[in-house]
Image: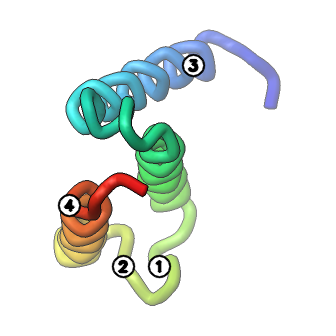
Amino acid sequence: MERNELTALLEAEREAWGEEAVQVLGGADFAARPHLQGVTLLLVAGVQYLLLRSRRIRTFGGVDLRSEAGWLQLKQAIRVLARETFAAAPP
């Protein structure tokens, strides 16, 4: 993809969102378990990918990306994953 004004804006927004997620979820957990930053960034990238793809496709893996119910399902899945991941004792 060629870089232009729109892609530069999206890049800045994507980076800001990733940094915010790291700040909100980070701290002592990230210091004790550095792999969590990678996990968090993969989740952010996945959500961003689905947001972009939802403009062209309606469903992904059986989830309706153009409905509130579909996004609620994804939010709940991320919530469960985050609770279980961050509640686990450091390795």
* Residue 83: percent from left, percent from top: 19, 63
Circles 4 and 3, Cβ within 8 Å, touching? The answer is: no
Instruction: Tell me the crowding category of disc 4: few under 14, some 14 to 19, or many 20 or more residues within 10 angstroms, Cα based.
Output: few
Alpha carbon distance from label 3 to label 2: 26 Å
Label 2 vs label 4, nearer the camera:
4
Alpha carbon distance from label 2 to label 1: 4 Å
* Residue 66: percent from left, percent from top: 33, 68
Circles 3 and 1, Cβ within 8 Å, touching? The answer is: no
Residue with the mark numbered 1: 59
What's the residue at 51%, 24% (across, down)?
Answer: 10
Quarter of the image with the C terminus in it = bottom left
Amino acid type indicated by mark 3: Leu
Alpha carbon distance from label 2 to label 4: 30 Å
Circles 2 and 1, Cβ within 8 Å, touching? The answer is: yes
Amino acid type indicated by mark 4: Ala
**Vertical order, 62 against 59 (above or below):** below
Between disc 1 and disc 4, whose residue precedes? Answer: 1
Alpha carbon distance from label 3 to label 1: 25 Å
Residue with the mark numbered 2: 64
Amino acid type indicated by mark 1: Thr
Between disc 2 and disc 4, whose residue precedes? Answer: 2
Residue with the mark numbered 4: 87
Let me know if residue 70 appears in the view. yes
- State the SS at label 1: strand
- State the SS at label 2: strand
Let me know if residue 78 appears in the view. no
Between disc 3 and disc 2, whose residue precedes? Answer: 3
Alpha carbon distance from label 1 to label 4: 31 Å
The residue lying toward the viewer, choosing from 65 and 25, is: 25
Quarter of the image with the N terminus in it = top right
Amino acid type indicated by mark 2: Asp
**Residue 6: mark in rendering:** 3
